[in-house]
Amino acid sequence: MAEIAGTTGRIGKRLTPTARRILFGRDLEQQINDDLPHMCRIDCAHVLMLAEREIIPAASAKRLLKAIQRLVEQHYA
């Protein structure tokens, strides 16, 4: 059984495979494969927003966007 961490209400230990299936309805590997493309698009949007607002330098944004693109091209490996 998972423990609740402190008073945050968050689970403090790794869920069992059965609990993950009940909560998420799919195995972890499938969940990762399904979610990573969306997460990368969101990350790119955040990087662009940070650069447009000059919170991070354009050169840093360019490096981050290239790194995310490499992850996508390598199928997140």
Image (cartoon, helix red, strand yellow):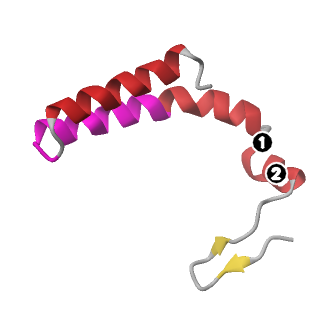
- In the image, 45: left or right of 59? right
Q: CB of mark 2 within 8 Å of CB of mark 1?
A: yes
User: In the rendered image, which quarter contains the C terminus?
Assistant: top right
| Label 2 residue SS | helix
- In the image, 75: left or right of 21? left
Q: Which residues are magenta?
A: 39-55
Residue at the image point whose x is 80% and y is 38% from the top? 27
> Dot 1: within a 10 Å radius of its alpha carbon, few (fewer than 14), some, or many (20 or more) residues?
few
Q: Is residue 17 above or below residue 58?
A: below
- In the image, 59: left or right of 25? left
The numbered dot on residue 35 is none
Q: Is residue 13 above or below residue 59?
A: below
Q: Nearer the viewer, residue 4 or 62?
A: 62
* Residue positioned most to the top: 73
Question: Label 1: which residue?
Answer: 25
Q: Is residue 12 above or below residue 41?
A: below
Q: Is residue 42 magenta?
A: yes
Q: Is residue 48 magenta?
A: yes
In the figure, residue 12 lies in which quadrant? bottom right
- In the image, 2: left or right of 58? right
Residue 21, how many percent across, how many down? 82, 47
| Label 1 residue SS | loop
Question: Label 2: which residue?
Answer: 22
User: In the rendered image, which quarter contains the N terminus?
Assistant: bottom right
Residue at the image point whose x is 30% and y is 28% from the top? 63
Residue at the image point whose x is 52% and y is 26% from the top? 37
Residue 39, how many percent across, how many down? 48, 35
> Dot 2: within a 10 Å radius of its alpha carbon, few (fewer than 14), some, or many (20 or more) residues?
few
Residue 57, how many percent across, how many down? 15, 38
Which three-letter amino acid code belongs to the residue tagged 1?
Gly
